[in-house]
Image (tube, rainbow, N blue to C red):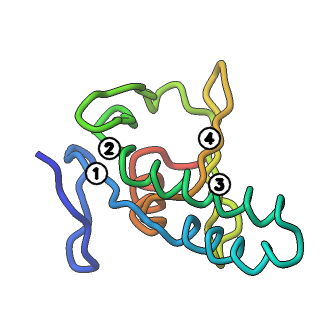
């Protein structure tokens, strides 16, 4: 069962929570790339293309917090599973405007742009994988 988070209803540790997409970062990059085209066409074009790429990723990729893992899906197909028991640390960079999610597993480090609801992400992380 997948639940959604509202201010009056926080998930319990056993429910599965699917993060809603957030288009904030992709839209900022696309809109920043447009006037940058007048200054430098290459930089503006690359910025806008990167924003469109992240927007596409926001649509097709989803994160699901289960009782034991963070699962990454492309459409209906699970493409990666990250068991919480292997996590050593996590952090959301730049709290005023969250832009990057970092977590470290025993064998690897991961960085993800915040293309998902940052509030729900933080709630799920604090609840299921408290920092040590």
Provide the secondary structure element on which disc 4 rests: strand
The residue drawn where x is 88% and y is 69% is: 40
Reading the image, the residue beneath label 4 is: 103
Q: Whole-Å distance between the Cαs marked 3 and 4?
A: 23 Å
In this picture, is 77 found above or below 63? above
Residue 30 marker: none
Q: Whole-Å distance between the Cαs marked 1 and 2?
A: 4 Å
Residue 92: % across, % down: 63, 58
Q: Whole-Å distance between the Cαs marked 4 and 1?
A: 18 Å
Answer with the quarter of the image where residue 43 lies.
Answer: bottom right
The residue drawn where x is 33% and y is 60% is: 20
32 sits to left or right of 41 = left
Give the foreground label among 3 and 1.
3
Q: How many residues crowd around disc 4 within 10 Å: few (fewer than 14), some, or many (20 or more)? A: some
Residue 50 marker: 3
Reading the image, the residue beneath label 1 is: 18
Provide the secondary structure element on which disc 2 rests: strand
Provide the secondary structure element on which disc 1 rests: strand
């Amino acid at each position: 069962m997948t639940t959604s988070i509202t201010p009056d209803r926080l998930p319990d540790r056993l429910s599965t929570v699917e993060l809603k997409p957030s288009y904030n970062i992709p839209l900022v990059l696309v809109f920043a790339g447009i006037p940058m085209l007048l200054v430098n066409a290459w930089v503006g074009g690359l910025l806008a293309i990167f924003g469109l790429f992240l927007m596409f990723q926001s649509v097709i990729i989803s994160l699901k917090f289960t009782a034991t893992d963070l699962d990454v899906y492309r459409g209906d197909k699970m493409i990666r599973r990250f068991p919480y028991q292997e996590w050593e640390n996590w952090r959301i960079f730049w709290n005023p405007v969250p832009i990057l999610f970092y977590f470290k597993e025993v064998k690897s480090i991961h960085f993800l742009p915040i293309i998902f609801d940052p509030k729900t992400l933080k709630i799920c992380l604090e609840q299921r994988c408290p920092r040590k």
